[in-house]
């Protein structure tokens, strides 16, 4: 049998250049979202205009492709492409046009949406065979009819396309022939006719199909061609979580991408760490690239605008971003005008949610609090410091708080008072218009997110517009403009001050929110006789009601590109992008908030703007020569970022709270104003070459040369190369017989990326200028701020990656696994130098950190029937992190939080973010009194190790998620569980909740688990009225608990209405859903806070170390997705 | 082909858009690079101004829980307590004589690092002042004298706290010579004396009390420090016998009419000690650390006068009170409770408080412990929440005491020495004249007289952080023995917390951090 190149569906495997281009274009279209081909009327509504004289057919077809989305597939062998035609077509549809072109020839065509097959009439291979008619029905995996499927007799050009009901009929089929069924987005199938006259075929979705394309930075590649490690998430998955922040939706979706949600505050940002922390002093944040433009403050972007997210994880993928790629790259593609079918699609996505306090902490109520105080007073004699007070009793005579019998008048539940049911909502209206040669998208969003702590909120208005066009056969253009304004009232989440997130626990229950006369309460009252010595605390409700921490942010983000189609396969693209962030912070704290801003009040306004622009120009060349597919890229880039800040200075001395921050002149004491400015710039050159031989052997080489102003004079430019190899074993002939194996691809990469995120001007010795008090005024003051280091350069991360993709059992089980080993050297370290120099450190390239681990992604379709499917995705990352070298002499470095003896220690051989403190060995027993006295302790006090040691770590070994999706008819159910394992949490609030009893409220457990003569075998110290008896508090191992948890991240039930029914009412799609996020959390019994994942110190190493936290809500959401 | 050419041209033009050299050049605008500095007189001035509030002067910065760094000496003497020592572990470790280079690394660093920061900045000024264009010779001299004063002040503190330390006299401008060995105590003192002699003799500094000299270092400031340096060089560990020099320098201030002791007014409220508490501009002040309500306020200092329970009284604008530097009964025994004005209520101390407002207005509460009154600042406590009282580090009274001791040590007990001590005692005496006191003092043996000076120093300067300096210099520990306030050898003495001093307690440990950073350092003995 003649086995020449023939049709293999829409994507022809005819190895000629021309067709390769067609295929590439097809892929591009798939990429922008044409994967679901709707049964549209494109072919009828699209009008063709042609005016050609004596022109080859091939050029006419190209002209049609250029002015429309039609793409031709044909075999050059059977179609005379060089035949010259004369044409004058105006406003005709494709069918009419084709009938003119091929009038009088034996060329036939079949049109399937935008895809047109050309074939020769009556051409058949072997006439000697017995021939007959074969018919049948093609269905999709759910059993629904599948129209538009190409059905071709293998090895011939004879074929047809299934009709609207999925039926097909082919005549003159040899009895021993094989039929090939193919459809975009589905796996092609071959069925032997074997004398059958009726053949039914069920097409399977090609979930990890060969033809899926992924963004790889400066373009896209077929996923099958990618030899590096790239993770993908789509809009649908991102939006499931109905959250303000897109990173929330990304959580758990890509293995190796760990997203820590450290706060329930709407303004709280998520922390992203890809394959471990690489660095000590520079940022561990990935690089965000949105539509090709680097973006800062990604957390404010509207998640509804995102079409898909690719995460470049290994060196091969990230090296194209060179000196900024070491932390991984998050590539975001936003929605555009095309993608929802023809004409105009209007869609609305909205949700409303209610967030509630997910958990309440067991604190002492009024009765327990007074009992604890009585015990504290009774214990006076036991402590040397309070022995002289022995015999004193709690004074209950204050009529503001106690009744005549001394019982507390109030029993305030501060957790209830400070939190609320937070109602949030979001509305997104999208208008997408697909024209013949252009498309326009308009997207409007309003999101109002309330926090569960009073008065905290974050709101966003977002407008986005896109315009894409192919105005000339040689030119394409695309533009995108986004205006994003957010405004918020923040809540203090840092530091150790008595602010609401602390006082909502520490304010004793005996104190009311307000006194009967309407006055706000606090822990201090005029004329108060309470002799407890309560620590000074503002009432948290008072604070949250009157204090303002307003944040305003306007982001203007846009880009425009021109693509010149220079010649076959060769494009030149030039793109400019702008990311402008205009920020204003306005703070006011009134003059009656005790221990916060009384008696003077304070107000401050600061403005800071960040303007980033980039210009990038690059050439891409794609070609296919026989079985060799080549994809090449070369380009250059300039970018610059300037940052300017001006701060009014903090004004205090407000006699009235009337003005807030709106009349700073009303304050009597202004602090000196300040302003600051800095700039960095980069100039880069990059190349990439990808090679694919016969879809079996893959190779990619990438290199980028980056020049950064931030590096020292002696090292302006850095070079970042990488290489990757892939082997698609399943495409080897010797594997063909293994029917259960669909894909097996091995890939490995090695390369180098960098981190240039050192502070600007770090290489220079600079003079710091300010003022000091001198002679009752301000005297100018200057000092040398740092030592110069002109040799400074970027951090280098060398990364090795080895992985495989495996799909088996008809793609029902897919496994992606990657092992990686990263070694970051030349760490930009604040290298400790002797303090005798007058400096504490110099920024230098010293030190090494390694990360090694596994990324595992398992996708299974457990059950698949006509009505019911059950799919499972398990997504995990194991990472282990080790400091290999530090400084000149491997000195330990102590960092945050520096709180009652607790620090994070950086020590060679240990994980970054190791907790460093004393080990709690227990409590001193009565029998050990003499031994205790040696360290100045008495029985009932904590017994600790003599020296500090490493007592935990804040970065987890395992992170991941397990997502189960069930579909039954129109119903879908998602259960998204997220887990973290092998991590510790340091509960610094034990300092005041356990160790400093008596001056504030604390855990109820101290009453029941605290040391007494009859309960000596306990970790919890004896109740000790701190005000008189002092305290014994050190950040020790008793405060550390297992930080592992399992979280009910999202449970969602959705219903998608039948298309047929909807069409009647003019809908294209309607889905309604209800969900619960943060539904539950299973954590250590030793964890006494709200959520074991939080931070108080926003730095690199403070993960899971916190002193109180903004509780994360449990959120109930109802939402709809409608399109018309 | 035309379009290809066109776009190739465009492409090339984009490449030529910027000259890369300029594009990647770093030019800070809100900071000055070192090469641009010391360009004029103002630069030199501002570099010296910086020294007024960094290094040793920063040890007076107060925090409500921790007190001040200057109080560490009081804590390790065991004679002062802090109500919040439960969380301020350094206080406990000092009192327990358990200061450790690892455990107390951070606190030791505060002592060590701040001094060297200031020394580095002073070295920078000393190097560049002579070559600063536009700086008149007289002005250059004054600035040089101020810079050298501060370098000496910081080295003096280092040598007292840590013994011999690396001697660095040039500013660091590259990564050369990072690791420097300790110099001897004598070498450090030699540098201090050289710097101070320059300041006193060649600096051209005004011979005025510091507040009258625009709060700039005066000849009086430098002389006061030099007198103290000579006194300390005479004691442990150098035992360099510079008593005569100490006396000479101290007397040069006592005998200069620009300086004068504060005199008692007619009422208890206008006593010298209350004037000391309330007035910033007195001729007694030789070197002060300045505070101001709007630029640099003295923070929590006024709250050190009240026990922490006072926080709930609703009386004060401060939310937290803490007896951060409470003298224990052993040291209070130094006072003659009936005849020493300083020991009377609302002079240096107070023991009770009368409410000024609210339901308890007029009610008086008595404290369990004697509390300092020294930092009582009604305006800050009741109204502004900002302490503005300057803190004197050297005042003329101390010069009288230095002179008295130095003369007695070098020439024996004579009328001059007795007169100086009597001047200070008479100001505080409620029942004796200066003449009566002088006569009595003349009858003392040399040893008795010197101990009387030490006692007087404790009485006069109890809240001025001098105690540990005198204990380590004399190696004698003030204590109460058989009901009598006296001095016993420090090594072997037991503090009120039951801990016994050893030789190692004379010095603090070098912070572990610095030991790691500089392999050439040798830890102080015993640590």
Image: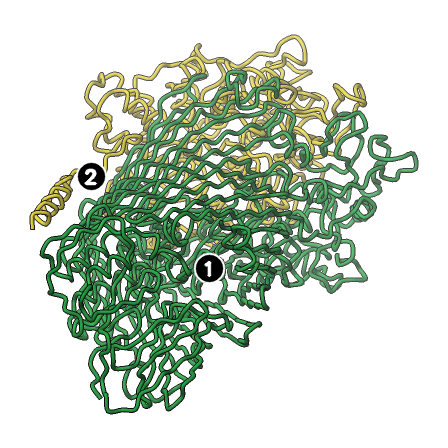
Chain colours: A green, B yellow
CA separation in Å, label 2 and label 1: 36 Å
Q: Secondary structure at mark 2?
A: loop
> Residue B111 versus residue B175: which sits nearer the camera?
B175
Chain where mark 2 sits: B
- Using a 10 Å C-alpha cutoff, classify the residue at mark 2 as few (fewer than 14 neighbours), some (14 to 19) or many (20 or more): some
Q: Secondary structure at mark 1?
A: strand
Mark 2 — residue?
B25
Residue projecting furthest to the front: A104
Chain where mark 1 sits: A
Q: Are marks 2 and 1 in contact (CB under 8 Å)?
A: no
List x then y, in percent, for residue B120. 32, 37
Within the image, what quadrant is residue B270 found in?
top right
| Image mark count | 2
Within the image, what quadrant is residue B457 found in?
top right
List x then y, in percent, for residue A108. 25, 69
List x then y, in percent, for residue B431. 69, 16
- Residues beneath discs 2 and 1 located on the same chain: no
> Residue A722 versus residue B366: which sits nearer the camera?
A722
Taking B297 as reference, is A281 above or below it? below
Of marks 2 and 1, the one in the foreground: 1
Mark 1 — residue?
A258
Is A861 on the left-hand or right-hand side of A798? Answer: right
Can residue B226 be seen at all in this image of the molecule? no
- Say which residue appears at 65% left-offset and 18% top-offset: B429
Q: Quadrant of the N terminus of chain A?
A: bottom left
- Say which residue appears at 33% left-offset and 79% top-offset: A180
List x then y, in percent, for residue A425. 58, 43
């Amino acid at each position: 049998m003649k086995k020449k190149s023939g049709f293999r569906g829409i994507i022809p495997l005819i190895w000629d250049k021309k067709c390769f281009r067609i295929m590439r274009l097809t892929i591009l279209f798939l990429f922008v979202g044409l994967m679901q081909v709707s049964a549209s009327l494109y072919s009828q509504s699209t009008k063709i205009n042609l005016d050609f004289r004596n022109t080859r057919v091939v050029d006419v077809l190209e002209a049609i492709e250029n002015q429309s989305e039609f793409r031709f597939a044909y075999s050059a062998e059977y179609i005379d492409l060089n035949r010259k035609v004369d044409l004058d077509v105006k406003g005709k549809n494709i069918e009419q046009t084709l009938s003119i072109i091929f009038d009088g020839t034996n060329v036939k065509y079949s049109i399937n949406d935008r895809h047109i097959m050309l074939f020769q009439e009556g051409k058949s291979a072997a006439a000697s065979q017995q021939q007959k008619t074969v018919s049948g029905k093609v269905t999709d995996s759910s059993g629904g009819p599948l129209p538009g499927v190409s059905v071709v007799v293998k090895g011939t050009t004879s074929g047809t396309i299934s009709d609207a009901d999925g039926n097909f009929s082919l005549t003159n089929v040899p009895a021993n022939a094989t039929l090939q069924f193919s459809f975009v987005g589905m796996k092609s199938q071959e069925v032997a006719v074997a004398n059958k006259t009726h053949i039914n075929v069920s097409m399977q979705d090609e979930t990890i199909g060969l033809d899926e394309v992924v963004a790889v930075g400066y373009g896209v590649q077929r996923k099958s061609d990618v030899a590096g490690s790239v993770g993908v998430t789509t809009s649908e998955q991102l939006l499931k979580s109905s959250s303000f922040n897109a990173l929330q939706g990304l959580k758990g979706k890509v293995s190796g991408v760990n997203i820590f949600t450290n706060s329930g505050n709407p303004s709280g940002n998520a922390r992203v760490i890809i394959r471990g922390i690489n660095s000590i002093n520079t940022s561990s944040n990935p690089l965000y690239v949105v539509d090709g433009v680097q973006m800062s403050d990604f957390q404010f972007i509207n998640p509804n605008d995102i079409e898909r997210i690719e995460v470049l994880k290994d060196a091969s993928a990230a090296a194209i971003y060179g000196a900024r790629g070491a932390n991984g790259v998050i590539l975001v593609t936003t929605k555009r005008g095309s993608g929802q079918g023809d004409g105009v699609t209007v869609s609305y996505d909205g949700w409303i949610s209610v967030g509630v306090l997910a958990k309440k902490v067991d604190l002492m109520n009024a009765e327990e609090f007074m009992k604890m105080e009585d015990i504290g007073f009774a214990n006076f004699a036991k402590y040397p410091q309070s022995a002289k007070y022995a015999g004193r009793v709690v004074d209950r005579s204050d009529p503001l708080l106690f009744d005549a019998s001394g019982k507390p008048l109030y029993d305030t539940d501060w957790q209830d008072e400070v939190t609320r049911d937070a109602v949030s909502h979001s509305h997104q209206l999208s208008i997408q218009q697909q024209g013949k040669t252009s498309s326009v998208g308009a997207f409007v969003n309003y999101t109002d997110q309330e926090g569960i702590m009073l008065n905290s909120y974050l709101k966003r208005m977002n407008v986005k517009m896109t315009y894409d066009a192919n105005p000339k056969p040689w030119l394409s253009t695309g533009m995108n403009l986004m205006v994003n304004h957010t405004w918020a009232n923040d809540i203090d989440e840092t530091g150790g001050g008595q602010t609401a997130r602390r006082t909502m626990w520490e304010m004793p229950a005996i104190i009311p929110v307000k006194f009967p006369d309407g006055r706000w309460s606090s822990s201090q009252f005029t004329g108060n006789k309470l002799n407890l010595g309560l620590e000074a605390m503002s009432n948290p409700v008072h604070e949250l009601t009157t204090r303002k921490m307003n944040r305003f942010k306007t982001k203007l983000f846009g880009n425009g590109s021109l693509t010149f189609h220079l010649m076959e396969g060769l494009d030149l693209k030039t793109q400019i992008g702008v990311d402008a962030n205009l920020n204003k912070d306005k703070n006011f704290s009134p003059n009656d908030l005790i221990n916060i801003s009384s008696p003077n009040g304070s107000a401050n306004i600061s403005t800071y703007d960040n303007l980033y622009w980039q210009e990038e120009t690059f050439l891409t060349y794609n070609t296919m020569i026989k079985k060799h597919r080549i994809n090449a890229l070369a380009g250059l880039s300039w970018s610059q970022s300037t940052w300017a800040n001006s701060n009014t200075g903090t004004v205090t001395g407000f006699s009235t709270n009337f003005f807030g921050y709106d009349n700073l002149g009303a304050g009597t004491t202004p602090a000196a104003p300040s302003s600051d400015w800095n700039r960095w710039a980069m100039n880069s050159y990059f190349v990439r070459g990808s090679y694919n031989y016969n879809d079996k052997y893959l190779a990619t080489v990438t290199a980028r040369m980056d020049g950064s102003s931030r590096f020292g004079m002696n090292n302006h430019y850095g070079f970042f190369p990488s290489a990757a190899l892939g082997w698609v074993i399943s495409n080897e002939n010797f594997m063909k017989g293994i029917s259960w194996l669909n894909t097996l691809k091995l890939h490995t990469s090695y390369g180098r990326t960098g981190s240039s995120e050192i502070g600007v001007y770090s290489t220079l010795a600079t003079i710091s200028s300010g003022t000091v008090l001198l002679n009752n005024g301000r005297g100018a003051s200057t000092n040398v701020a740092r030592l110069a280091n002109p040799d400074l350069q970027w951090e280098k991360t060398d990364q090795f990656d080895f992985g495989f993709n495996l799909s088996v059992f008809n793609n029902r089980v897919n496994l992606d696994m990657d092992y990686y080993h990263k070694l970051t050297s030349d760490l930009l370290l604040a290298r400790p130098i002797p303090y005798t120099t007058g400096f504490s450190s110099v920024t230098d390239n010293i030190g090494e950190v390694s990360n090694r681990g596994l990324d595992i992604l398992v996708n299974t379709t457990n059950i698949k029937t006509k009505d019911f499917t059950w799919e499972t995705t398990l997504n995990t990352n194991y990472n282990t992190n080790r400091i290999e070298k530090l400084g000149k002499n491997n000195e330990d470095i102590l960092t945050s939080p520096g709180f009652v003896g607790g620090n994070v220690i950086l020590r060679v051989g240990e994980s970054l973010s190791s907790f460093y403190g004393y080990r709690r060995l227990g409590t001193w027993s009565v029998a050990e009194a003499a031994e205790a006295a040696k360290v100045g302790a008495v029985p009932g006090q904590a017994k600790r190790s003599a020296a500090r040691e490493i007592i935990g770590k804040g970065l987890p070994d395992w992170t991941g998620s397990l997502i189960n999706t069930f579909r039954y008819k129109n119903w879908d159910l998602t259960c998204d569980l997220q887990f973290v394992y092998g991590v510790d949490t340091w509960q610094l609030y034990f300092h005041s909740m356990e160790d400093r009893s008596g001056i504030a409220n604390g855990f109820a457990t101290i009453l029941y688990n605290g040391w007494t003569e009859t309960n000596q075998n306990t970790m919890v110290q004896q109740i000790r009225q701190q005000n008189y008896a002092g305290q014994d508090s050190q950040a020790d191992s008793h405060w550390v608990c297992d930080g592992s948890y399992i979280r009910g991240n999202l449970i969602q039930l959705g219903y998608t209405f039948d298309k047929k029914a909807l069409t009647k009412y003019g809908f294209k799609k309607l889905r309604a859903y209800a969900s619960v996020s943060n539904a539950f959390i299973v954590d250590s019994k030793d964890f006494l806070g709200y959520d074991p994942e939080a931070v108080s110190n926003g730095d690199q190493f403070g993960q899971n170390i916190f002193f109180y936290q903004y509780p994360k809500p449990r959120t109930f959401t109802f939402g709809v997705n409608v399109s018309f | 082909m035309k379009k290809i050419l066109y776009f190739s041209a465009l492409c090339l033009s984009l490449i030529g858009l910027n000259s890369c050299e300029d594009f990647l050049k770093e030019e800070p605008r809100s900071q000055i690079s070192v090469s641009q500095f010391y360009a004029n007189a103002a630069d030199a001035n501002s570099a010296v101004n910086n020294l007024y509030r960094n290094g040793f002067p920063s040890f007076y910065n107060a925090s409500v829980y921790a007190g001040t760094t200057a109080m560490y000496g009081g804590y390790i003497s065991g004679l002062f307590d802090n109500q919040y020592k439960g969380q301020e572990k350094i206080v406990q470790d000092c009192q327990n004589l358990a200061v450790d280079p690892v455990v107390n690394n951070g606190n030791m660093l505060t002592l060590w690092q701040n001094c060297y920061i200031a020394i580095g900045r002073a070295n920078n000024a000393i190097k560049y002042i002579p070559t600063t264009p536009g700086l008149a010779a007289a002005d250059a001299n004054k600035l040089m004298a101020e810079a050298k004063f501060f370098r000496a002040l910081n080295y003096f503190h280092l040598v007292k706290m840590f013994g011999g330390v690396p001697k660095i006299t040039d500013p660091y401008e590259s990564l050369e010579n990072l690791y420097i060995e300790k110099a001897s105590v004598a070498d450090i003192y030699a540098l201090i004396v050289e710097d101070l002699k320059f300041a006193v003799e060649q600096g051209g500094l005004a011979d005025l009390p510091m507040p009258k000299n625009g709060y700039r270092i005066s000849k009086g400031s430098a002389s006061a420090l030099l007198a103290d340096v000579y006194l300390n060089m005479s004691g442990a560990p150098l035992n360099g016998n510079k008593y005569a020099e100490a006396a000479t320098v101290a007397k040069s201030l006592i005998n200069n009419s620009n300086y004068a002791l504060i005199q008692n007014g007619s009422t208890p409220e206008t006593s010298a000690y209350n004037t000391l508490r309330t007035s910033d501009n007195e001729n007694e002040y030789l070197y002060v650390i300045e505070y101001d309500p709007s630029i640099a306020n003295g923070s929590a200092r006024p709250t050190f006068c009240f026990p922490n329970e006072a926080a709930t009284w609703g009386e004060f604008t401060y939310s937290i009170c803490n007896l951060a530097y409470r003298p224990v009964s052993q040291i209070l025994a130094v006072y003659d409770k009936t005849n020493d004005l300083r020991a009377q209520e609302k002079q240096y101390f107070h023991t009770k408080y009368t409410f000024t407002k609210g339901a308890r207005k007029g009610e008086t509460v008595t404290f369990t412990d004697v509390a300092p009154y020294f930092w009582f600042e009604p305006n800050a406590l009741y109204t502004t929440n900002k302490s503005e009282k300057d803190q004197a580090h050297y005042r003329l009274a101390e010069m009288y005491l230095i002179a008295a001791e130095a003369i007695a040590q070098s020439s024996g007990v004579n009328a001059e020495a007795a007169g100086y001590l009597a001047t200070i005692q008479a100001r505080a005496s409620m029942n004796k004249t200066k003449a009566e006191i002088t006569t009595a003092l003349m009858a003392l043996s040399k040893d008795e007289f010197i101990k009387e000076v030490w006692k007087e120093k404790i009485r006069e300067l109890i809240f001025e952080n001098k105690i540990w300096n005198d204990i380590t210099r004399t190696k004698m520990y003030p204590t109460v023995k058989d009901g009598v306030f006296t001095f016993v050898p420090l090594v072997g003495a037991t503090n009120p917390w039951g801990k016994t001093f050893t030789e190692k307690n004379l010095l603090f440990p070098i912070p572990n951090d610095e030991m790691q950073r500089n392999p050439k350092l040798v830890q102080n003995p015993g640590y």
